[in-house]
Amino acid sequence: MNTTSRMTAAATFLALLSWAWTGVALGDPASTDETASLAGHSRCLNLLGTNANRTENQEYREDALLWILEEASGITISHTNLDWEEVQLLELHGVTLLGRSPEDPQAAVIQLSRALAERLGCEAALYQLRRDDNLGQSNRVLAVFDHAVLLDHDGRLGYILTPEEASPAWLLAWKRPGVTFHPTTKRSGRSRAKRPRPKPKRRRPRRRR
């Protein structure tokens, strides 16, 4: 993405957030109030799920996902799920990812289209998509990044991106249950101390008779 495109996308994102937050006080992201949302109306439970769904998704995530390391070169995912063989880009019609929420680092901001909102019985507006939320009936939110959201899609790994953002490099590290992986250490450049060689014994000269 060039500089002009990035500036345009950032300006659009900030404009949408300003519109959504006018006169709206955001609550605690961990609140048990299922009606709290970014735009001050229903959380669209048909899309994002209930508190019971979030509890189930949290247990699923903690059991399968060990850790995530985000670096400039890519994102490494350590896990125990044999079905997570690759990470595929998903296209969810009617849902646009706008980026990470400035109010909660474990949540993203999504825009719901009017057509999808009508089918779900919700408002076409901005919503907070939190870690452990549903995203429809087939997706669980595993992690949130600046420009991507990692999902479990029917038992497989997938992700969605903000518009025009390049896909990150994904690296999967599977850990077999009962096996502990120790970090590898590099040898230092110092030479090892050499043991002194034993001095050869001098032979005594034989006496001539």
Image (spheres, rainbow, N blue to C red):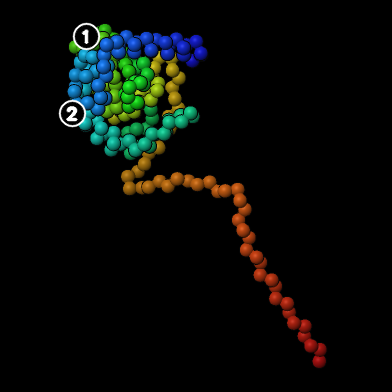
Residue 118 marker? 1
State the SS at label 2. Answer: helix
| Residue 68 in view | yes
Query: Which residue is under mark 2?
Result: 52
Q: Quadrant of residue 109?
A: top left
Q: What's the amino acid at mark 2?
A: Ala
Residue 59: x, y in percent? 24, 35
How many numbered discs, if any? Answer: 2
Q: Is residue 125 above or below residue 203?
A: above
Residue 133 position in % (x across, y down): 26, 25
Image position of 117 (left or right of 206): left
Q: Can I make out residue 94 in this image? A: no
Mark 1: which amino acid? Answer: Glu
Q: How many other residues sit within 10 Å of disc 1, few (<14), some (14-19) or many (≥20)?
A: few
What is the x, y in percent for residue 172?
40, 34
| Identity of the residue furthest to the right in this view | 208
Q: Nearer the viewer, residue 111 or 13?
A: 13
Q: Where is residue 183 drawn, in percent x and y?
A: 45, 45
Q: Nearer the viewer, residue 101 or 57?
A: 101
Which of discs 2 and 1 lies nearer the camera? The answer is: 2
**Image: 65 above or below 112:** below
Residue depicted at x 42% and y 10%: 11
The residue located at (32%, 35%) in the rendering is: 65
Dot placed on the residue nearer the N-terminal end, 2 or 1: 2
- Residue lying furthest bottom: 209
| Residue 208 in the image: above or below residue 76 | below
Could you tell me which residue is drawn at 61 percent across and 51 percent down?
190
Q: Quick one: label 2, few (<14), some, or many (20+) residues within 10 Å? A: few
Could you say whether the residue bearing mark 1 is in a helix, strand or loop?
helix
Where on the picture, by quarter, is residue 205?
bottom right
| CA gap, disc 2 and disc 1 | 24 Å
**Going by the image, does 169 lie left or right of 125?**
right
